[in-house]
Image: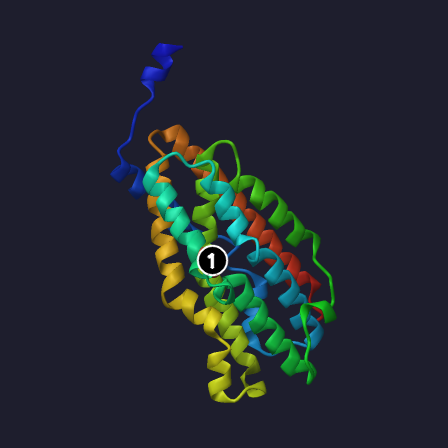
């Protein structure tokens, strides 16, 4: 047994970094990023019921981001990986300012859009409560991946989450521009703070940190394989989520 362990080939952090960066780049070929929902969302304004469906399900999947990061943090053993994850968590929680918590900014932005579309004040309490089965599955099984007792799996899920996030927000933002005629030009941009902080800086850094966090936690090929499993599993859940959302649209 000890001989078998000794046969494991250790890889350097630099080598792991290269391998993991290549895995991360592969997300651009995955259906999680090339999905039918993005194309439809970007093409033109949707009926208000479809916008409600999107708002409910998008919030449902994005809001527990802090929970996923906190769950992963408890599994991490490397100090750099732990520090980078806390920085990400701090971003999500508005660096201690409750009004800047990302989930709060997102909810405010979506409720503002829905209020404009309905012509009256609308909150999440007033809209369709439909959370799709694919959304529930993404949240439930996603959290399990981040908290897997093998932290390499959680690091792979983190890699997928952060590399999916930037193109996700670019696509969602471009689609939001279809509703610009419901705002003054200045109001539209004021209400797009959630997008600008992510696209401008936050998600760029999260992508970089997700690679270095993972590289700190992988010293063998077996660990990189576990990481790839977590990465692919989370991307597959995201692909199923976007496809489920597309299929549920009245215009699909
Ligand atoms: Fe965020
Ligand atoms: Fe992020």
- Count the marks: 1
The C terminus lies in quadrant: bottom right
Q: Residues within 10 Å of mark 1 (few under 14, many from 20)?
A: many
Which of 54 and 91 lies nearest the eye of the viewer? Answer: 91
The N terminus lies in quadrant: top left
Q: How far across and how far down the image is residue 204, in percent?
A: 36, 60
Q: Which residue corresponds to mark 1? A: 92
Q: Is mark 1 within 8 Å of ligand 1?
A: yes
* Residue at figure coordinates x 37%, y 68% from the top left: 200
Which of 41 and 184 lies nearest the eye of the viewer? Answer: 184
Q: Callout 1: helix, strand or loop?
A: helix
Q: Describe residue 83's horizontal placement relative to residue 73 as left or right.
A: left
Visible residue check, residue 28: no
Question: Residue 108 lies in what quarter of the image?
Answer: bottom right
* Residue at figure coordinates x 55%, y 47% from the top left: 236
Visible residue check, residue 59: yes
């Amino acid at each position: 047994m000890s001989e078998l362990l000794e046969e494991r080939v250790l890889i350097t952090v630099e080598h792991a970094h290269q391998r993991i960066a290549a895995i991360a780049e592969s997300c651009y070929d995955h259906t999680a990023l090339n999905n039918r929902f993005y194309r439809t969302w970007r093409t033109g304004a949707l009926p208000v019921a479809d916008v409600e469906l999107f708002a409910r399900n998008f919030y449902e999947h994005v809001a527990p981001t802090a929970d996923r990061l906190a769950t992963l943090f408890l599994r991490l053993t490397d100090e750099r990986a732990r520090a980078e994850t806390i920085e990400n968590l701090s971003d999500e929680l508005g660096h201690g300012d409750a009004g800047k918590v990302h989930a709060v900014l997102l909810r405010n932005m979506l409720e503002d859009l829905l209020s404009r579309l309905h012509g009256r004040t609308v909150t999440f309490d007033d809209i369709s409560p439909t959370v799709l089965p694919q959304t529930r599955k993404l949240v439930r099984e996603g959290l399990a991946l981040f908290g897997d007792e093998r932290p390499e799996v959680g690091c792979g899920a983190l890699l997928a989450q952060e590399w999916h996030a930037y193109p996700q927000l670019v696509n969602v933002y471009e689609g939001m521009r279809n509703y610009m005629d419901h705002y003054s030009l200045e109001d539209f941009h004021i209400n797009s703070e959630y997008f600008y902080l992510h696209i401008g800086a936050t998600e760029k850094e999260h992508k970089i940190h997700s690679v270095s966090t993972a590289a700190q936690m992988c010293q063998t090929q077996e660990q990189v394989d576990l990481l790839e499993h977590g990465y692919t599993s989370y991307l597959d859940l995201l692909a199923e989520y976007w496809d489920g959302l597309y299929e549920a649209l009245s215009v699909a």
